[in-house]
Image (cartoon, helix red, strand yellow):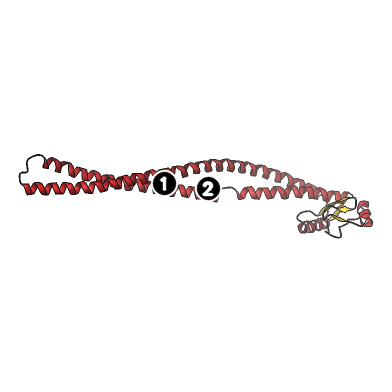
Amino acid sequence: MPVVADLWNLQETDTALDSRRGSLDDAQSRLGDTDELVAQRARAEELQAALRAAESAQKDVEIEADDLKAKIEPAEKKLYSGTIKNPKELGDLQADIDQLKRHLSAVEDRDLAALTAVEAADKEYRAAAGELDVMETSAREEQTELTQRIVKLQGEIAEYETERGDRLEYVDDDLLKRYEHIRAAHQGRAIAKLDRNLCLGCRISLPTQLVNKARAGNVLVQCPNCERILYA
């Protein structure tokens, strides 16, 4: 049954082509950054920005505290220098110093809170950056593997396309159209093998007369149930 055998060989080549083309499409669709990686990168950037903002806020509070200390120190020196004799002037200066110290105490409390916020932001950012580093390393490895797989699949597809062209020399145009029509209707399987009197395409038991006709090989015989060409 050379005609059916030629179709069977063509189908084997087409099946191999379909498989590799599907694998190629899948591999190419996975090239580039994943949604998870993009999201993690954005999260790390947001946390880094939050850390910088916390550090800037803490620095501002620290500068404010330094300014207050710079005012208190000369005022206290003046208070205890003995140069001021007027009791009212001394009282006013002491009141100003006390007010500055109360303000400094409040600012130092804010500075402590700001430092705590910086530490928390730094810890969260470092954790996110570490996770991002792991994900990016894994992604680079996966992208390298995908690229290598794509090159390999493209080479195999080219080989099978050449093989298909060679096989088409043994199939006439009308038979090829018939084969392609059945193949399109049955997920790429236009030819079904016979196992005794069983069509392996649809697992239906066939009449003995039909089986004998298929085995004789004089004409193409199709399964009455699934319409695939039978190959004994």
Q: Residue 221, percent across and down?
A: 88, 56
Residue labelled with disc 1: 48
Residue placed most toward the observer, 83 or 130: 83
Task: Work out whether residue 218 can be spotted.
Answer: no
Residue that badge 2 annotates: 37
Q: Nearer the viewer, residue 55 or 12?
A: 55
What amino acid type should be assigned to the residue bearing mark 2?
Leu
- The residue under label 1 is which amino acid type? Gln
Asked if residue 178 lies left or right of residue 58, the reply is right
Percent position of residue 110, x then y: 30, 48
Q: CA distance from mark 1 to mark 2?
A: 16 Å
Q: Secondary structure at mark 2?
A: helix
Nearest the viewer among 69 and 179 is 69
Residue with the most extreme bottom position: 224
Query: Viewed as shown, does residue 133 lie left or right of 195?
Result: left
Label 1 environment density (alpha carbons within 10 Å; few <14, some 14–19, many ≥20)? some
Where residue 120 sits, quadrant-wise, is top left
Q: Is residue 95 visible?
A: yes
Please give the name of the residue rendered at 67% of the width and 48% of the height, measured from the top-left corner.
Answer: 23
Residue found at the very far left of the displayed protein: 85
Q: Residue 87, how many percent across, how many down?
A: 6, 47
Residue at horizontal 76%, vertical 49%? 15
Q: Secondary structure at mark 1?
A: helix
